[in-house]
Image (cartoon, grey):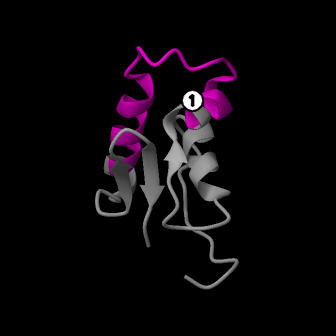
Amino acid sequence: PPPGRRFPFPSQGKAGISGTFGVCQRFDVALYRDRLYELVWNEPFSGETRTLDSHIQRLRKKLGWEEHIKTVFRIGYRLEV
C-alpha cells in the first residue's frame, strides 16, 4: 500500500490492539505476540494466556478483516492489505 495509507479502526473495544495495528509503519511484517501484549496491557507477557488471541479474533470479526489480520505461526500476527 502507498505510504501514509490509513485504515479505519473501531473506537470501542480494546482500542490498544486496534491502535497497535493502526500505527504499523510497514505492512506484511509480523508483530510478535509478546510485544503486542506488552503494548496493550502494559505488563510482561507470560506466554500462558489466550487473552491476546481472543481479542485478535474479535477484532478480525468486528472489522470483517478475517483475510487481513493473519496469524504467523509461533511468532504473532501480520496485517496484510
Residue at 54%, 67% in the rendered image: 27
Q: Quadrant of residue 22?
A: bottom right
In the picture, which quadrant includes the N terminus? bottom right
Q: Indicate left or right for 54 with 52 as reference.
A: left
Residue found at the far front of this picture: 74
Residue at 44%, 73% in the rendered image: 81
In the rendered image, residue 72, in percent from the top left (x then y), is placed at 37, 49
Which of 40 and 35 lies nearest the eye of the viewer? Answer: 35
In the rendered image, residue 36, in percent from the top left (x then y), is placed at 58, 37
In the rendered image, residue 70, in percent from the top left (x then y), is placed at 35, 55
Q: Indicate left or right for 3 with 50 as reference.
A: right
Residue at 54%, 56% in the rendered image: 9
Q: Amino acid at mark 1?
A: Tyr
Q: Is residue 50 above or below residue 24?
A: above
- Residue 57: in magenta span: yes
Magenta region = 36-60
- Residue 56: in magenta span: yes
Q: Is residue 25 above or below residue 47?
A: below
Q: Quadrant of residue 38?
A: top right
Residue at 63%, 24% in the rendered image: 41
**Label 1: which secondary element:** helix
- How many callouts does the rendering have? 1
| Residue for badge 1 | 37
Q: Residues within 10 Å of mark 1 (few under 14, many from 20)?
A: many
Which of 22 and 76 lies nearest the eye of the viewer? Answer: 76
Question: Magenta stretch: dominant SS?
Answer: helix
In the rendered image, residue 64, in percent from the top left (x then y), is placed at 32, 58
Residue found at the far bottom of this picture: 2
